[in-house]
Structures are given as structure tokens and as C-alpha cells.
Image (spheres, grey):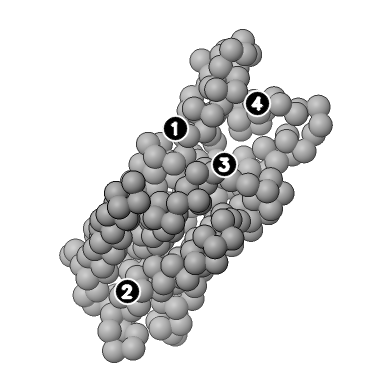
Amino acid sequence: MDVKNAVRALVVLVLCIGIAAGIAFASSQNTITFLSMPVLYSLVALAFATQWIVFIPSYLMKTEKCFDLTGSGTFIACTILVATAAQPLSLYQVICASMVLIWAARLGSFLFLRIHKDGVDTRFDQIKHNPYRFFVTWTIQGLWVIVTAGALYTAIASNATISLGGNMTSALVFLGVALWVLGFTLEVVADYQKRVFKQNPENKGKFINVGLWSRARHPNYFGEILLWFGAALTASVALSGWQYLTLISPFFVLFLLTKVSGIPMLEAKADKRWGDNADYIAYKASTKRLWVF
């Protein structure tokens, strides 16, 4: 079994590094350099190195408490690196960097406080005891950083001059910012409503069906997906050629949340807990999974 897991870990490692390096290579034309190489290469190295370094003590202590914080911190570190290398920044580059920094700081602090309050993240109950599976999880998080924010990082690193005036470019940027703000607001509000709901002792053991959660079963994920579509639209005006590959970002987020680690896991957990509850059955039948409006 250990040999199987070791081989799988090696395959995932090669794939993740290959995909991230491929994105960096394809997007490196007409971008700034750092340490005599395209700055995007440095972002790939930083993203994976950070995960692997934190993985070591996390595995030794069999804890997942630093996982989400490390992921968010990596977004912030990569943004600071590319923004520093791109100095002096234009207003457009500041907007792109702010999208990542604000989102990562908010999500990272939220998830960090939640894990320390709850004590555990049930997703890691089995994984954290297997070094290969745990290592794979951290490695995939490194890829998540590069793919998710790749379009914005490329836009910040681009040598293209983006003028925000009365033109179509500005219209696309402002539309992207508006979508990002809307998505970010929905995510923050949904998370806040759920936290308040869970803090009320009267709601212990109940499922949330108030506020945005009365309109969709996963409004926070809807906000998350929407904000990355807004970010991609904002970044698109600075891209060219193979750099457009980085616009896979919001579709990657959509895939992860709807097919992999987001909704499927939460829905299965909720069905197991409240599957025979008439109110839950009615709630599930009358609300959409994702779409808030």
C-alpha cells in the first residue's frame, strides 16, 4: 500500500509541477524578470516550496491547522513578490494585486479562526496520518495558488501598458472589478451569516436556511466563483498570446468547488446528517445548489 501511495504521490508531484511550470512558461513572454528569469518562474518555485516546508512539521505533528493559512499566505507572498518586481506599479497593477491580497487575507483569517475554534477539519481525518497522501494534498495546494491567481499574476507582471480612461479596456476592467466586489461581498456575507447562525445555541444540530442560505445551499461558493470570473475579466486586458491560457482560473475554481472538494463533500455530509429530516428534504428540493439570484 505504501508503494502504491508513494507512486501516486510521485505522479501527482510531476503533474502539478509540470502544469504550473507550463503555465509559467506559456505566460512568460513580455513579462518582467526577477533574478534574471521571468518572475512567473519564481512564483511557481515559491508556491510549491512554501507548501513543502510547512508540510514537514504539519505531518510530524499530524495536524491540518496550518493548511488553509499556508494556502492563503502563499497567495499573499506570491502577490508581494510579483508586485515588488514590477515596481513602480500602475493603477491597473495595484487593482490586480489588491484583488488577490484582500481576498486571501480575508479568507485565510476566516479559515484559520474556524479551524482553531473547531479543532479539526474532518477532510484530513485519514489523510494526515499517511505521509504520501498528506504530501499530495499540500502539493495540489501549490498548484491551486498558481492556477487560481495565474491570470492576475501575469497581468501584474506584464510589460503591457494599461490606461484606465474612457475606453473599452477601462470598461472591461471596471466590469471585472464590479463582479469581483459582488462575489466578494456575497462570500463574506454568507460566511458571516453562517457563523452567527452556528453561534446561536438554539441552532445546535440544525442546518442553516436563513439569509443568503435561504436562496442557495452554497452561496459562499457562488460568491467565490463569481469573484474569480471578475478577476479573470480584469486580468484579460493585459494578456496576449499563450497568456490567455491563464484565464482557465475561474473554470478551475468552478470545477474544484462543484465537482471535487467543495459541494460534493458538503452535500454528502449534510445528506448523511439530515437526510431523513423532512425540513431538510423540503429545503433541498426548493433551493438551488449555487445560484443566489
Q: Which mark is residue 264?
A: 1
Cβ–Cβ under 8 Å for marks 2 and 3:
no
Amino acid at circle 3? Thr
Indicate left or right for 5 with 112 as reference: left
Q: Is residue 30 visible?
A: yes
Which one is closest to the eye, mark 1 or mark 2?
1
SS class of the residue under badge 4?
loop
Residue 226 picture quarter: top left
Amino acid at circle 4? Phe
SS class of the residue under badge 2?
helix
Above or below, 93 against 185 in this view is: below
Cβ–Cβ under 8 Å for marks 1 and 4:
no
Above or below, 188 against 96 in this view is: above
Q: Which mark is residue 122?
A: 3
Residue at the (65%, 28%) spot, across then down: 208
Q: Which mark is residue 40?
A: 2
Cβ–Cβ under 8 Å for marks 3 and 1:
no
Crowding at mark 3 (Cα within 10 Å: few <14, some 14-19, many 20+): few
Crowding at mark 1 (Cα within 10 Å: few <14, some 14-19, many 20+): some
Q: Position of residue 250 (x, y in %)?
A: 37, 49
Q: Position of residue 218 (x, y in %)?
A: 53, 34
Which one is closest to the eye, mark 4 or mark 2?
4
Amino acid at circle 2? Leu
Residue 22 versus residue 136: which sits nearer the camera? Answer: 136
- The residues tagged by marks 2 and 3 sit, at their Cα atoms, a distance apart of 34 Å
Which one is closest to the eye, mark 3 or mark 4?
3
Pointer 4 residue? 207
Quick one: label 1 or label 4, which is nearer the N terminus? Answer: 4
Residue at the (23%, 77%) spot, across then down: 30
